[in-house]
Amino acid sequence: MTLDQLRIFVAVAEQQHVTRAANVLALSQSAVSSSIAALEAQYDVKLFHRIRRNIVLTDAGQQFLNEAPDCGAVRYRSRRVRRWQITGYRR
């Protein structure tokens, strides 16, 4: 999972609509859909119920959303630590 995938997942969950999330993120609808499909394939879990043009979180999707801020913070901190190790520069 990348930070971009995490950001896209959260936007879709908040908007409950792929196209609206794509507009908010300034991405194409197909890029957002592909990112969600990749996450679902990676974790072998369905994150959303697709109902007509709207989508609703599954129980697994809701749990993923609840943990998303922690995942993002951990990945961000790990990238900073890695940058410090490479450059020796902290900021």
Image (spheres, grey):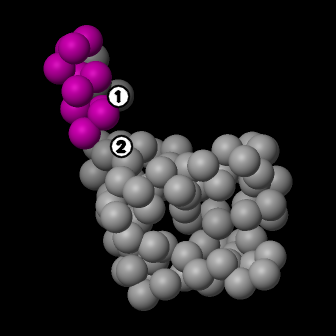
Which quadrant of the figure contains the C terminus?
top left
Extreme bottom residue here?
59
Taking the image as shown, residue 55 lies to the left or right of residue 76, namely right
Name the front one of labels 2 and 1.
Answer: 2
Task: Give the vertical position of 54 relative to 74 (above or below).
Answer: below
Range of residues picked out in magenta: 78-88
Q: Are marks 2 and 1 in contact (CB under 8 Å)?
A: no
Count residues near mark 1 (Cα–Cα under 10 Å), then give few for <14, some for 14-19, many for 20+: few
| Residue 75 picture location, percent across and down | 31, 46
> Which residue carries the number 2 mark?
76
Task: Give the vertical position of 7 relative to 68 (above or below).
Answer: above
Amino acid bearing label 2: Tyr
User: Is residue 83 within the magenta segment?
Assistant: yes
Please tell me the numbered disc located at residue 91.
1
Task: Give the vertical position of 29 relative to 55 (above or below).
Answer: above
Circle 1 SS class? loop
| Quarter of image, res 21 | bottom right
Residue 50 visible? The answer is: yes
Extreme top residue here?
87
Amino acid bearing label 1: Arg
User: Is residue 74 within the magenta segment?
Assistant: no
| Residue 14 picture location, percent across and down | 65, 74
